[in-house]
Image: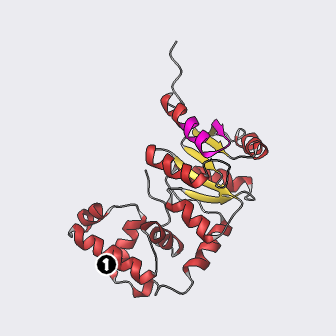
Amino acid sequence: MTAPEPDESRIRVALVDDHAVVRRGLRGYLELVEDMDIVGEAADGQAALDVVARLAAEGRAPHVVLMDLLMQGMDGVTATRLLTQRYDGVAVVAMTSYSEAHRIRGALEAGAAGYLLKDADADEVVNGIRRAHRGEMPLGSAVSRQLARAFSAPGGAGLDSLTAREREVLVLVAAGLSNRELANRLSISERTARTHVSSILDKLGLRSRTQAALYAIQEGLAPARPGP
C-alpha cells in the first residue's frame, strides 16, 4: 500500500532538545497550530541527523528544525552545520537560553536560519517557524538587541564609509548571492565582486559574509534571509 503524499500546505517541524520536558511543551503547543505538523523529535545532534535522514528517505523531511545548541554528544551548532550542508530545503532555527553575541554568530554562521530564546512567547515561536519556512531570518527581540549592540561596538566605520556600489553589493550579499552571482547581476567581473565584498568586510569590521548579511538586516537594508 502506497503511503499518502505529505501535505505540502502544512509546515513540517522537528524538535531537537536534550530536555524531554521542553520537547513535550513545544509539541503540546505546536500541535494546536493549524498549519504545522510535528514530524520528529531528537535529544541530541546525532539523533537529529538520524531523524531527518529517515524522514527525508520517506519523502517528508522537516521544513523547519528547532535546534537546542548545548546538548550532550553532538552539539546543536555541529548538527546545524551538517543539516544545512545535506538538506537544502531544511531551515534550522536555533532555540536556546543563551543570548551572547558570539553564540548567535556561531549558530548563524553554521547555517541556522534564525535564533530564538527559550523564554520567547509561544506566538513568537510560531511566527519564527513560519518566517524561517518562508526563507526569512527570525531573530528574537532580545537577540536583535544583542546583535545591534555588537554591531555598534567600535571596530567598524559604519554604513557611511561604504560607496554606493558597496551598499548595493551588501544588499545582494544579504540576499544570499555568491560572488559569481554578484558579478552576473552587476555586470562586473567575479574578481571585482570579491574585491567589493572584502572592502565591505574591512570597512565594517566584520569577519564573514554571514556577519555582513546580519549587519544589513540590523541596518534595515535587507529584511529577509536568503531563500534556499
Residue 109 shown left or right of residue 38 in the figure: left
Tell me the crowding category of disc 1: few under 14, some 14 to 19, or many 20 or more residues within 10 angstroms, Cα based. Answer: few
Please name the residue shown 50% across and 69% down the image. Answer: 214
Measured along the vertical axis of the image, is residue 3 above or below residue 101?
Answer: above
Residue 165 shown left or right of residue 84 in the figure: left
- Asked whether residue 50 is drawn in magenta, I would say yes
Measured along the vertical axis of the image, is residue 47 above or below residue 157?
Answer: above
Residue 177 image offset from top left, x and y in percent: 35, 61
Residue 215 image offset from top left, x and y in percent: 49, 73
Please name the residue shown 56% across and 36% down the image. Answer: 50
Q: Quadrant of residue 171 in the image?
A: bottom left
State whether residue 8 appears in this view: no
Residue 22 shown left or right of residue 205 in the figure: right
Comparing 31 with 56, the one in front is 56
Q: In the image, which residues are magenta?
A: 38-52
Residue 137 image offset from top left, x and y in percent: 54, 59
- Asked whether residue 37 is drawn in magenta, I would say no
Residue 79 image offset from top left, x and y in percent: 55, 49
Which residue position is annotated with label 1?
A: 165
- The residue sitting at the front extreme is 73
- The residue sitting at the right extreme is 21
Query: Colour mode?
Result: secondary structure
Amino acid carrying mark 1 in the image = Arg
Residue at disc 1, secondary structure: helix
Comparing 131 with 26, the one in front is 26
Q: How many marks?
A: 1
Comparing 98 with 183, the one in front is 98
State whether residue 116 appears in this view: yes
